Image (spheres, rainbow, N blue to C red):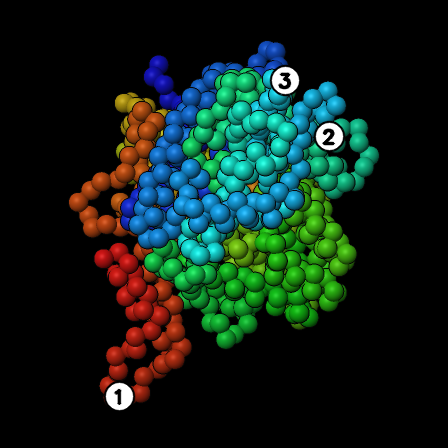
């Protein structure tokens, strides 16, 4: 039996490698490349906090559970993960070094602390003495000064100290709080150092009665995988209170990794590992700053300086051509279904829908799910306004949205204070669906506006993530949506919907049934196709059914940005399956399922990836697309992605990814979709300005508007 599966953790590491590879792409502006290194590093931090943390916990149990696809135990997975991470760190070091050389060519210099000029050293030493030294809180470790608690992802200096009596001690200096991370030289604003580099260089000034014999920069990563169900067991407290306590306790969970910058003596590494109870396999060394989050601050600094050539040319989300911005949005949705495509089109019409609903006398109730929202959310503000205006507002706030728990706790309190009825989910099922139902009553007749999306209700990420938003007045969609909300409110997941399919009850069976239909068509000699766009594929039941479909002759194409546990191109098994991954300027985030050839296809947009956690342990919603124009538009978008030969990489049978190479002109699907949004917006604007031409009047050439300006910038940038 050939190997048909890949391990999910190793597949994820390949995804993060694709992110890192963007930092080496010479066609990307320099400071945008720096952002990709920062994103890669943050991704890896979260991977250790969650996935490595989970596997570490599982490896301590006996007997160890076995992954149902790769058949690896948690210990075996960790053993495979760590060497690959070391390879990625080496690649990151190389990418950062090359990027710093390229930035030096345009005058931006990350100074080498061992090669400072006299003028630079004089300023930096003075800055250390006056601005940094008074705030530092160093601690020597001995019997009177126990080993301190080390915070997750905080940067520290560790020094090895020697007295005249040759007694050796270590000391730890926290350097993450109370400082501006980046220090710019006043006489050369484009030259900078990091605060930890300054403390490392001048730490001798701190320990004047000792000789510093060794020193290093380090930080630790702690397990962050909190167990909500276990915490709630036999607990009478309010769920939000439990989550607040869990978030606090997460900061104290066991370390799973220690990182050192540059060389480190064995004595320092040994003492730290012993105190932290970390084995050598969890020690990682690199020559890149350990905390790469400074990359975004650095970019903001130089963007303010007007160095536009180091960034992507600005792109503005366009007004949807399906909407007249000068008219109320609710009547337009009642007239026809509307699809918004982020970030190419603006989220403003959706926000306008909520604002309109909050003030509409005909609106009786608003029901909505919230998973991740912006820090300053217009969406939440509209919900609060609706409650203040006497509407019945129900909001499902998922407090378990990973790393957004604290933000969601804050918003849940504000919503409650405004009179919104807030619930925190559905028992053991995390509510990940993007669903809104507005109930109206006009002339004694009840109607609904329903919205189903693929991504979060977040104005910030809507400019960075590719997502789809369907707004419809289909009455039966509204009735289905209310059943889903009723299931959440009564702890009974909905299973009797007519159009919307919802996890954990109906989604997976529906997907398997639709795959089976394509298998039957293929076995009958009819054309059979499946087209999927998701972020990750790990659900073994769906993978196995896709394998059966491939064996039957179904043509399967998938756009999977991240994890793919299915091996493609295995003769006789998966040779009819093609998988590409697109990592580009925007984060690919939309989920679309298409079953059947274009003439008879079923199409759904969804909040769910094909991961077991989504199909079995979350509340997810997928909406069918009935409007033929919208269906054609989405199919066209998917085909553009499959024609991408700039950012797309094809999954190979050995699990590696390779750039798509062909003889077609260079095609970046994200840029082309933005161009298309500009074209549509320009045409719509012209139609509004000149709805009917006068009879016999010659038509003038349209003015050089936003589209032409964009195309001019586009061509100039990629020339």
How many C-alpha atoms fall within 10 Å of the one at disc 3: few (<14), some, or many (≥20)? few
Looking at the image, is mark 3 or mark 1 earlier in the sequence? Answer: 3
Q: Residue at x 49, y 72 (%)?
A: 325
- Check disc 1 and report the residue beneath it: 697
Verify CB contact (< 8 Å) between mark 3 and mark 2. Answer: no
Quadrant of the rendered image containing residue 148: top right
**Element on which disc 3 rests:** loop
Query: Observer-nearest residue: 424 or 601?
Result: 424
- Residue placed furthest toward the top: 63
Separation of marks 1 and 2 at Cα, in angstroms: 75 Å
Q: Quadrant location of the C terminus?
A: bottom left
Q: Is residue 162 left or right of residue 529?
A: right
- Residue placed furthest toward the front: 164
Query: Observer-nearest residue: 708 or 480?
Result: 708
Looking at the image, is mark 1 or mark 2 earlier in the sequence? Answer: 2
Q: Is residue 560 visible?
A: no
Q: Quadrant location of the N terminus?
A: top left
Q: Is residue 420 left or right of residue 282?
A: right
Q: Residue at x 74, y 65 (%)?
A: 388
Number of the front mark, 3 or 2? 3
Q: Residue at x 54, y 68 (%)?
A: 329
Number of the front mark, 3 or 1? 3
**Element on which disc 1 rests:** loop
How many C-alpha atoms fall within 10 Å of the one at disc 2: few (<14), some, or many (≥20)? some
Residue 661 point in image, percent of width and height = 22, 40
Separation of marks 3 and 2 at Cα, in angstroms: 51 Å
- Check disc 2 and report the residue beneath it: 231
Q: Which mark is residue 165?
A: 3
Q: Is residue 168 left or right of residue 531?
A: right
Q: Is residue 157 left or right of residue 588?
A: right
Query: Observer-nearest residue: 411 or 204?
Result: 204
Q: Is residue 719 visible?
A: yes
């Amino acid at each position: 039996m050939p190997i048909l599966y890949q391990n999910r953790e190793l597949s994820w590491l390949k995804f993060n490698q694709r992110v890192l590879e963007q930092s080496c792409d010479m066609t990307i502006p320099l400071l945008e490349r720096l952002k990709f290194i920062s994103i890669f590093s943050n991704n890896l931090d979260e991977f250790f906090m969650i996935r490595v943390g989970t596997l570490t916990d599982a490896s301590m149990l006996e007997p160890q559970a076995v992954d149902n696809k790769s058949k690896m135990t948690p210990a075996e997975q960790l053993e495979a993960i760590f060497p690959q991470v070391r390879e990625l760190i080496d690649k990151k070091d190389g990418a950062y070094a090359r990027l710093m050389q390229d930035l030096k060519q345009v005058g931006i210099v990350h100074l080498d602390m061992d090669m400072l000029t006299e003028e630079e050293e004089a300023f930096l030493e003075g800055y250390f003495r006056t601005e940094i030294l008074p705030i530092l809180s160093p601690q020597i470790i001995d019997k009177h000064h126990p080993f301190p608690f080390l915070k997750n992802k905080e940067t520290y200096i560790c020094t090895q100290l020697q007295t005249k009596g040759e007694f050796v001690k270590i000391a730890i200096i926290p350097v993450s709080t109370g400082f501006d991370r980046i220090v710019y030289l006043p006489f050369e604003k484009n030259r900078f150092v990091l605060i930890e580099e300054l403390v490392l260089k001048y730490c001798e000034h701190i320990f004047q009665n000792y000789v510093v014999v060794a020193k290093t920069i380090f930080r630790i990563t702690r397990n962050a995988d909190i167990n909500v169900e276990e915490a709630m067991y036999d607990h009478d407290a309010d769920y939000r209170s439990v989550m607040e306590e869990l978030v606090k306790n997460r900061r104290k969970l066991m370390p799973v990794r220690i990182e050192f910058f540059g060389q480190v003596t064995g004595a320092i590494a040994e003492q730290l590992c012993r105190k932290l109870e970390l084995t050598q396999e969890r020690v990682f060394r690199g020559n890149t700053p350990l905390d790469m989050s400074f990359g975004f601050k650095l970019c903001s600094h130089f963007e303010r300086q007007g160095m536009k050539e180091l960034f992507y040319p600005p792109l503005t989300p366009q007004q949807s051509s399906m909407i007249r911005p000068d008219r109320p949005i609710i009547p337009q949705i009642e007239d026809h279904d509307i699809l918004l495509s982020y970030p190419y089109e603006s989220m403003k019409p959706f926000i306008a829908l909520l604002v309109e609903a909050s003030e509409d006398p005909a609106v009786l109730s608003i029901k909505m799910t919230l998973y991740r929202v912006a820090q300053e959310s217009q969406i939440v503000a509209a919900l609060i306004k609706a409650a203040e205006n006497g509407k019945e507002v129900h909001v499902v706030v998922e407090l378990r949205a990973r790393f957004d728990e604290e933000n969601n706790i804050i918003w849940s309190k504000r919503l409650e204070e405004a009179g919104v009825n807030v619930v925190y989910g559905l028992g053991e099922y995390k509510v990940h669906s993007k669903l809104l139902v507005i109930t109206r009553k006009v002339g004694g007749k009840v109607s609904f506006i329903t919205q189903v999306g693929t991504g979060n209700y977040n104005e910030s990420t809507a400019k960075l993530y590719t997502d789809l938003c369907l707004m419809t007045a289909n009455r039966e969609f509204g009735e289905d949506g209310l059943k889903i909300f009723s299931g959440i409110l009564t702890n009974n997941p909905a299973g009797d919907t007519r159009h919307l399919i919802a996890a954990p009850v109906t989604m997976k069976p529906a997907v398997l049934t639709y795959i089976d239909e394509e298998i039957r068509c293929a076995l009958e000699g009819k054309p059979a196709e499946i087209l999927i766009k998701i972020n990750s594929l790990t659900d073994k039941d769906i993978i196995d059914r896709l394998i059966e479909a491939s064996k039957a002759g179904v043509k399967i194409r998938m756009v999977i940005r991240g994890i793919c546990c299915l091996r493609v191109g295995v003769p006789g098994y998966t040779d009819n399956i093609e998988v590409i991954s697109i990592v580009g300027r925007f984060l690919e985030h939309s989920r679309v399922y298409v079953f059947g050839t274009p003439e008879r296809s079923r199409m759904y947009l969804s909040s769910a990836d094909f991961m077991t956690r989504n199909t079995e342990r979350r509340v997810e919603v997928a909406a069918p697309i009935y409007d033929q124009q919208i269906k054609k538009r989405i199919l066209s978008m998917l085909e553009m992605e499959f024609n991408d030969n700039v950012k797309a990489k094809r999954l190979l049978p050995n699990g590696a990814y390779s750039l798509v190479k062909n003889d077609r002109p260079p095609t970046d699907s994200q840029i082309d979709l933005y161009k298309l949004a500009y074209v549509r917006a320009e045409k719509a604007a012209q139609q509004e300005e000149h709805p009917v031409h006068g009879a016999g009047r010659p038509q003038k050439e349209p003015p050089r508007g936003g589209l032409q300006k964009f195309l001019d910038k586009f061509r100039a940038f990629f020339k």
